[in-house]
Image: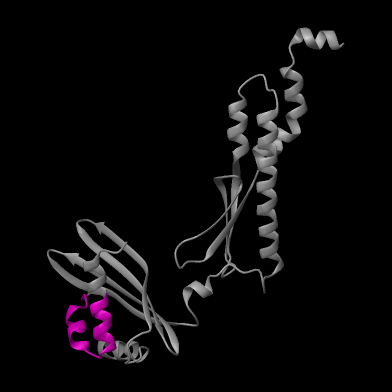
C-alpha cells in the first residue's frame, strides 16, 4: 500500500512532465543527480508521454527506506494510453525537512507488465519445460515419501524424518519471462519446489533436490526392520 501523500507527490511531478512544465521539476532536482543538460533530458522524457489523459494509471512498485536519518521513497507507475504503454518512476529524498527529486524516469513498454509476465507454456525452450517437469517431479516425490513416512512404523524420531522430507536442498530458479536463471547451493525450500510472482513481476519457478525424501525412500526397509521388537524378530527367524 502506497501512502497517499507519497503517491500524490510522485503523480504531481509526472503530471508536470506531461504538461511540459519543466521549471518546477528542475527546481526540485537534487544537485547530486542534476546533469548539465537537465532541460534537454526532461524534454526527451516528456516527448514519450502523449498530451491526452491516460486510459489508466496503476501503481506497480513502491519502496521506502531510511539511511542515516535520510528518508527516501520510490514510486513506479504503469501508464496506459490508446497507442502505447509507459512505465514512470519518481524517487524522492527527504532530508532536514526538504524534499528533492533523486530519480525521474519514463520508459516505453511493448505491452502491459501483466501481459509481459503472464505465465504461458507456448514458445518456450526445452530448459523451461525441463525445469517445470523437475519441479513437478520434486513435489510428487516429496509428498509420496511424506505419506509413506507417516504410515510407516519407525522406532525413533519419526518427526525428524518428516521435517527432513519436507525440505529440499539447493535451489535452481528460472525467471519465466526472461529465461535468466540462478543456482544457490546453500539454500533450502519447503516441498522442494515453488512458483511465485510479485504483483506485476515475472513468475519465478524454483526446484530443489528432495534429499530427505530420497534418503527416506532408500532407507525405508532398513527403518522398518529396526522398528520391529527384538523378540518378534527372533520369532520370525
Q: Between residues 63 and 140, which one lies in front from this camera angle?
A: 140
Furthest-right residue in view? Answer: 237
When the figure is inspected, residue 154 is found, relative to residue 78, above or below; the finding is: above
Residue under the point 59% across and 47% down: 170
| In the image: residue 128, left or right of residue 108 | right
Across and down, in percent, residue 142 comes to 66, 42
Q: Position of residue 233 (x, y in %)?
A: 80, 12
| Principal secondary structure, stretch drawn in magenta | helix
At a point 65% along the width and 30% down the height, the residue shown is: 150
Q: Which stretch appears magenta?
A: 11-31
Q: Nearer the viewer, residue 221 or 67?
A: 221
Residue 222 placement: quadrant: top right
**Residue at the location (21% across, 68% down)?**
5
- Image height of 157 relative to 16, above or below: above
Q: In the visual, does 83 lie left or right of 139?
A: left
Is the C terminus in the top left, top right, bottom left or bottom right quadrant?
A: top right
The image quarter containing residue 18 is: bottom left
Q: Residue furthest front?
A: 55
Position of the N terminus by quadrant? bottom left
Q: Residue furthest left?
A: 97
- Confirm whether the magenta stretch covers residue 18: yes
Q: Is residue 36 visible to the viewer in this orientation of the structure?
A: no
Q: Residue at x 43, y 89 (%)?
A: 82
Number of dots carrying numbers: 0
Residue 144 visible, this orientation? yes
Which of these two is toward me, 135 or 38? 135
Q: Is residue 96 above or below residue 146?
A: below
Q: Position of residue 112 (x, y in %)?
A: 47, 77
Q: Position of residue 136 (x, y in %)?
A: 67, 53
Amino acid at each position: 500500500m502506497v501512502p497517499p501523500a507519497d503517491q500524490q507527490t510522485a503523480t504531481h511531478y509526472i503530471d508536470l512532465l506531461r504538461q511540459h512544465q519543466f521549471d518546477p521539476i528542475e527546481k526540485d532536482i537534487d544537485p547530486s543527480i542534476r546533469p548539465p543538460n537537465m532541460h534537454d533530458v526532461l524534454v526527451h522524457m516528456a516527448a514519450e508521454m502523449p498530451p491526452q489523459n491516460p486510459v489508466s494509471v496503476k501503481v506497480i512498485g513502491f519502496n521506502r527506506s531510511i539511511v542515516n536519518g535520510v528518508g527516501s521513497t520510490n514510486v513506479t507507475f504503469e501508464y496506459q494510453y490508446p497507442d502505447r504503454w509507459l512505465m514512470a518512476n519518481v524517487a524522492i529524498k527527504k532530508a532536514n525537512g526538504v524534499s528533492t527529486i533523486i530519480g525521474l524516469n519514463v520508459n516505453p513498454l511493448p505491452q502491459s507488465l501483466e501481459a509481459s509476465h503472464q505465465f504461458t507454456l507456448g514458445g518456450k525452450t526445452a530448459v523451461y519445460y525441463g525445469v517445470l517437469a523437475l519441479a513437478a517431479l520434486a513435489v510428487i516425490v516429496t509428498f509420496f515419501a511424506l505419506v509413506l513416512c507417516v504410515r510407516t512404523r519407525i522406532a525413533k524420531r519419526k518427526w525428524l524424518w518428516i521435517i527432513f522430507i519436507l525440505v529440499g536442498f539447493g535451489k535452481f530458479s528460472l525467471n519465466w519471462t526472461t529465461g535468466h536463471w540462478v543456482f544457490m547451493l546453500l539454500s533450502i525450500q519447503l516441498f522442494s519446489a515453488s512458483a511465485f510472482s510479485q504483483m506485476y513481476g515475472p513468475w519465478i519457478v524454483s526446484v530443489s533436490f528432495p534429499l530427505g525424501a530420497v534418503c527416506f525412500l532408500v532407507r525405508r526397509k532398513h527403518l522398518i526392520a529396526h522398528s520391529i521388537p527384538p523378540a518378534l524378530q527372533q520369532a520370525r527367524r
